[in-house]
Amino acid sequence: MESQTSDKLWPLRPRPCRSELFSSWLVRVARCYEMPVQTFCRAVWPGREVWRGDVDRQIDDEALYLLSSKTGVAYAELFSMTLRAHEQYAGASPNDESARELYFHFGNTDVAIRYCPGCLAERQPYFRLEWRLAFVTVCPRHRRPLLERCDYCKAPCLFANVDVHRPFGSCRRCHRHLASMGKVVDRDMALQVELHLEFQENVLSVLRQGRTAE
């Protein structure tokens, strides 16, 4: 891995996946070098606590520009993967923390993240940005409720804490793959799923229209 002072691209630099959450991509980059993401961040940004608190909301422009120069991923694309891209919808002012807690699902990625087992079963598992939004509770593709814990050991989904030698998308505690989680959706649950899906799609549609109008 090249030093952050070098002008060269890093040799291993996976592209972000569609609608991927920034922290998910950063963990995948770190795993290419068989490094826990905390260790990776200390190597890239010596003396800085980049992976601390909620990196998806707190990552700054300087760090994003460095990652862009080292991975070849445009700054604008990296920024769009962060929750900073949603900040304008979360509250009326930068200090409106109560509104942000209602808008975002948990204020700290060290708590947990929702996930869809069906999505994680795909060829390249990764975590979506929209799973961090409080009003997104259903996967529109698989029409299943999003989960927060392992069905077996009940550990919360903390993808950044999974051992680098275990598959990405595994449970950090029992190591079962999260793609195997989830109960069969019965008729009553299917109705609830459709109602939730209609609501969240309406909200997302309004947000997308707002971005287009800017």
Image (tube, helix red, strand yellow):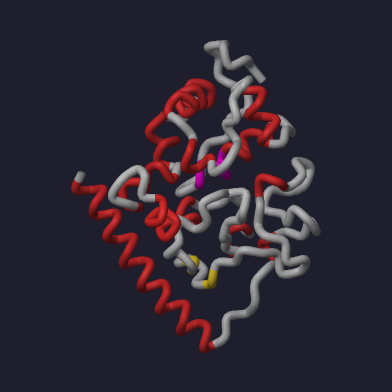
Identify the residue at image location x=34%, y=60%.
Answer: 204
Q: Which residues are magenta?
A: 21-25
Identify the residue at image location x=58%, y=37%.
Answer: 26
Quarter of the picture holding the N terminus: top right
For residue 13, what is the image quadrant? Answer: top right
For residue 24, what is the image quadrant? Answer: top right
**Magenta stretch holds residue 149:** no
Compared with residue 53, is residue 115 higher up or lower down, i.e. above or below?
Answer: below
Residue 125 relative to residue 39: left or right:
left
Total labels drawn: 0
- Magenta stretch secondary structure, dominant: helix
The furthest residue to the bottom: 187
**Magenta stretch holds residue 22:** yes
Q: Position of residue 76 (x, y in %)?
A: 37, 33
Q: Nearer the viewer, residue 155 or 176?
A: 155
Residue 8 relative to residue 38: left or right:
left
Q: Nearer the viewer, residue 192 or 18?
A: 192
Identify the residue at image location x=35%, y=52%.
Answer: 90
Q: Position of residue 97 (x, y in %)?
A: 41, 51
Work out whether residue 23 can be spotted: yes
Q: Position of residue 125 (x, y in %)?
A: 61, 51
Identify the residue at image location x=74%, y=33%.
Answer: 34
The furthest residue to the left: 213
Q: Position of residue 85 (x, y in %)?
A: 37, 43
Work out whether residue 124 can be spotted: no
Quarter of the picture holding the C terminus: top left
